[in-house]
Amino acid sequence: MELASEATAPDHKLVIRNIGLLLSGKIEEPLLDADTIVAIGGRIAAIGKSKDIDQDGAHLVIDAKGAALTPGLIDSHVHPAAGDWTPRQNQLNWIDSTLNGGVTTMISAGEMHMPGRPRDVVGLKALAISSQRIFSNFRPSGVKIHAGAPVIEPEMVEEDFKELAAAGVKLLGEVGLGGVKDGPTARRMVSWARKYGIQSTIHTGGPSIPGSGLIASEVVLEADTDVVGHLNGGPTALPDREIRCICEGCKRGLEIVHNGNSRAALVTLRMAHEMNQLHRVILGTDSPAGSGVQPLGIVRMISMLSSMGDLAAETAFCLATGNTARMRNLDAGIIEVGRAADFAFMDKPQGSAGKNLLEAVQLGDLPGIGMVVIDGLPRVGRSRNTPPAERIPEIAGS
C-alpha cells in the first residue's frame, strides 16, 4: 500500500465505508450509530449511514471491512527534541513508531532533553520559539506535534510571557523542571501565561531528571496550572492522600501517564470516577524519558484503565481523544463534522478471548491497528507494533 506524505488538497474527498463500530471520542456519547464518513480537504464533512451519504466523486475510498474506527489518539505529554530523534534514548523515528500505536497528535511538556538546553531567559525563550517553528513546519510521518514549551525560570518577568505568546508559543513546559519550584512564584508566572493565552502544566511527584525536585500537593494547588501533569508520578507518585487532595482541591485537568505509577493511575481514575468528573482525566506517555520510548503507551493505558479500573472500553478511549482535545483546545480527537479527519482503524487482536474490540480491551488486550489516517490521508497501514488485527481496512482498488 502506498501511503501519503504530502499535505491534503483542499478538494480531496475521502470516503470511509463499512465501519463496524464508530467511537466518537465524546465522553457523553462515546458510540455513534453510523457506518460511513466523508472528509473533504482533510476535515470531516459527513457522518451517517451509507444510504444517506453522498459518496460520489471520491478521490480515495477506504473499506473498513467491519473494523472499528476511533479518533486519532492524542498523547498529552511528550518531550520532543530534534525532529524524529530523541537524544534522551538516542533513538531515531520514535514519533513514527508512536504513529504505529494510533497516535496522531502529541503535546510537548517541554523540550528539556535537548543537549545543552539553555536556562537563561534569552536562551530558553529562543529554544521555545525555535521548537514551535520547527514542529509547525515539520510533521514527522504526518504526526501533529504541538511544541515550543519553555521551562520557566525565576528570573522571568511578565513581558517575557507576552513576548512568547506574540511569537506563537502556546504552552509552558512542566513547572518544576526548572528553577521555579515554589507555589507563589509558580502561581504568578502561570497567571502571566494564562493572561496571554499560554496553557500550563506542572510536574507532580518525585524528581524525574537532575535539576527537578519533589512537587507536592500544596505547590500543585497553589500554582493552579491548567493541567496537573502525570498525577500518577513522573515516575514517582505522591501518597494517595495528596492525590485525593489535588483531585478534590482543583478543577483542572488530571493527567495520567504510561511512564508513571500504575497503581496511582488507578487511584486517580477511581477518585475522578467517584467525583463524577471523568471528563477531567487525560492520558499521556511522558516519553521519551528515563523509562524509555513507549510507542504503544497510549493504547496500553486505555487497556489497563479499562480492564483494571472498571471502565467501559469506549469511555477509556475518550480519555485519550475527546477529553484531551477539549482540554487542549484541539480540532482533532472527536469525530464530528468540521473537525480534522484523523482516525485509527482498530479491531480485536487475533487470538483474543474478547468477541470484539471493546470486549478485548475490557479484558486487557491491546487492540490491533490496521491503518492510521491524518487529515484525510492514510499515513501508515497495518501497524508494525500492535498485535495483528482480525479485520484490516483496504484502500479500494489497491
Image (spheres, rainbow, N blue to C red):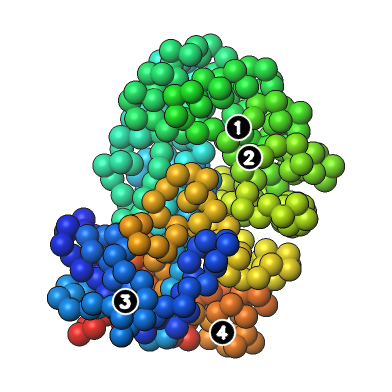
Q: Quadrant of residue 378?
A: bottom left
Could you give the CA–CA distance between mark 3 and mark 1, rounded to whole angstroms? 39 Å
Q: Position of residue 358 (x, y in %)?
A: 59, 77
Q: Which mark is residue 16?
A: 3
Amino acid on which disc 2 is placed: Arg
Q: Of callouts 2 and 1, which one flags the residue occurring earlier in the amino acid sequence?
A: 1
Badge 4 element: loop
Could you give the CA–CA distance between mark 4 and mark 1, rounded to whole angstroms? 39 Å
Residues at marks 2 and 1 touching, judged by CB atoms closer than 8 Å: yes
Q: Relative to 66, is 205 above or below?
A: above
Q: Residues within 10 Å of mark 3 (few under 14, many from 20)?
A: many
Name the side, left or right, on which 122 lies relative to 237: left
Which dot, 2 or 1, sits closer to the camera?
Answer: 2
The residue closer to the viewer here, 122 or 162, is 162
Could you give the CA–CA distance between mark 2 and mark 4, rounded to whole angstroms? 34 Å
Q: Relative to 221, is 73 above or below?
A: below
Q: Position of residue 293 (x, y in %)?
A: 52, 53
Q: Report the residue that reaches farthest toward the right.
A: 241
Could you give the CA–CA distance between mark 2 and mark 3, rounded to whole angstroms? 36 Å
Could you give the CA–CA distance between mark 3 and mark 4, rounded to whole angstroms? 20 Å
Q: Relative to 314, is 111 above or below?
A: above
Amino acid on which disc 4 is placed: Asn
Residue that label 4 marks: 356
Residue that label 2 marks: 252
Quadrant of image for the N terminus: bottom left
Amino acid on which disc 3 is placed: Ile
Residue at point 61%, 53% (across, down): 279
Residue that label 1 marks: 225
Q: Relative to 249, is 34 above or below?
A: below
Q: Of callouts 3 and 4, which one flags the residue occurring earlier in the amino acid sequence?
A: 3
Q: Of callouts 4 and 1, which one flags the residue occurring earlier in the amino acid sequence?
A: 1
